[in-house]
Structures are given as structure tokens and as C-alpha cells.
Amino acid sequence: MQELTGNIYDYPVYYDLIFGSDWVAEFKFLEAAFKKHVTGKTKRVFEPACGTGRLLYRMAKAGYTTAGLDLNDKAIAYCNARLKKHGLKETAWVADMCDFTVKKPFDAAFNTINSFRHLNSEKATVAHFQAMANAIRPGGIYALGFHLTPLEGIPTDEESWSARRGNLQINTRMWPRDKDPKTRIERFNLRFDVYRPTGSVRIDDCLVLRSYTWKQFATMIKKVPEWTVEAAYDFSYDIDEPIEIDAATEDVLYILKRK
């Protein structure tokens, strides 16, 4: 097996297969959240850190006006090519989710798979939520999903999963490399074992993420007063089963509402 060290976001076909396989549950939940939590109608939706557009293009196909941004130019090229392939406008662009503007505010936004935790400082995080407050109209929502660090119990630090599309199969494993409780910076090894008819390849990457306990997130979000926590759900994506955040909570999808 050929072995490579690289950025997983530079391999959009592989990334999309691994992280796009469970899109149906997320999509249905988001549409239900728009109906339940957005004041007024939801016509315009936005995704910061949209990556390959695994959800964005499906929102566009469903009739929403969509836009998204990401720092990785390869992922954005893949996203826009996908939109074009389906006869949709190419509305994704390369930008920093801490420093961007939009021409017209959106009704809702979503960021569901830990991308938020790539922001590695309080300053960057607050800047992101301020930029998002400027991008979402009053009464709109921001659905934000990520892993909290539980204060009770043993955290789920290691994950393995597989996905297949046609003759392409990818086995993925993620496990912790090191954690610094003072800086709250955690590094995770991420491995893709890619199997194709033409041969196999292993891609090793390291994800650098900032950690949050439920109390740390509650304190941080108060620094951007335009947002309030409307509700919270877990990764079962059941709109009829909101959860109460406590010391044992790990997987959470916050519904933040724009005041």
C-alpha cells in the first residue's frame, strides 16, 4: 500500500465519501429545524466551512438559495463543480470563516461536523460568531454541531468507520495524538485507507482542534450577544427530542438564534 502524508481536505473525492455518507439524517433534521426554530420562512441558507458541499448542493437542489465558504480551494472547486453539474449556481467561495461578509443576510446557517473546532483561539471563535451574526438575519438560526469534552464519564476519543461508492472503498480511523488542557488544543491522527481497482493508498493527516466543555461554550457564546441558545439536540437528529446539556454531554447540535 502506498503511504502518503497530507491534508485530507486536499482529497475532496475521498473526503466527500467518508463524511457525506450520512447526509440524509442531517438534511431532514435541518429542514425540520428551519420549520421549528426560524422565525418566518427559510429561503436562503448558508454554510461556513462547507467543504465539498455535501449538504449545500442538496439544499440547492431542494430549492433553497444557497452559499458557502471554505479555506480549502480544492474543496471549493469540487463544490462548485458539483453545483454546476446539477444545473445550479456556483455559489461557494474561498474565505476565512472568521473574516467574511455577505451581500444579503441569510435565514439560516449550518455547520454540523466539528469544523467549528478548527478555530484554535478565543479571538478567532468570537470573530466567527460575530461574522455569522452579520450574515444571518434576526429570527434566523445557526445549527452548530460538534463534540464537547464531557466532564463526567470517559470521552469517545477514537472512531473507525467505512464508506463505499462503486469500486471505491475507504476505511477511516481517528485517534488522539496529544492534548494540552491549558491551551485546549487537541491533535488527532486521521487515517484514510483507500481501496481502488487501480491500487490502494494510505493517507495520514493530523487534525488540530480546540476543545470545549459545555460550560466553556456557554461562556464563550455570551461574548457575542446577538446570539442566544434556542435549543440543543444530539446526533440522533430527532427534532422531537431536544436535550438538556449537562456535564456528561458529548455529541451536541446547538440551535443558536439570531436576536
Image (cartoon, rainbow, N blue to C red):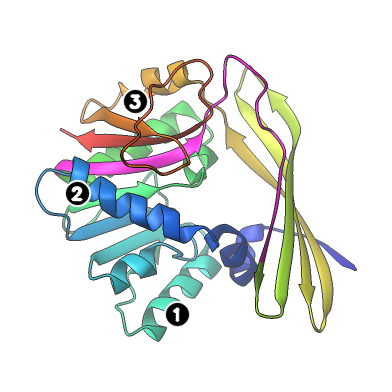
Q: Distance between the residues labelled 2 and 3?
A: 24 Å
Residue drawn at point x = 53 percent, y = 62 percent: 20
Q: Name the residue under label 3.
A: 221
Q: Distance between the residues labelled 2 and 1?
A: 30 Å
Residue 56 placement, left or right of 136: right
Q: Does the magenta stretch include residue 182?
A: no
Q: Position of residue 240 (x, y in %)?
A: 31, 38
Q: Mark 1 points at which residue?
A: 81
Q: Exactly how many numbered labels are in the figure?
A: 3
Residue 3 placement, left or right of 231: right
Q: Residue 142 carries which label?
A: none
First in sequence: mark 2 vs mark 1: 2
Q: Position of residue 122 (x, y in %)?
A: 45, 27
The three-letter code of the residue at mark 2 reads Lys
Residue drawn at point x = 29 percent, y = 78 percent: 89
The three-letter code of the residue at mark 1 reads Ala
First in sequence: mark 2 vs mark 3: 2
Q: How far apart are marks 3 and 1 (CA)?
A: 35 Å
Q: Mark 2 points at which residue?
A: 35
The three-letter code of the residue at mark 3 reads Ile
Estimate how packed mark 3 is, as few (under 14), some (14 to 19) or many (20 or more) residues with alpha carbons within 10 Å: some
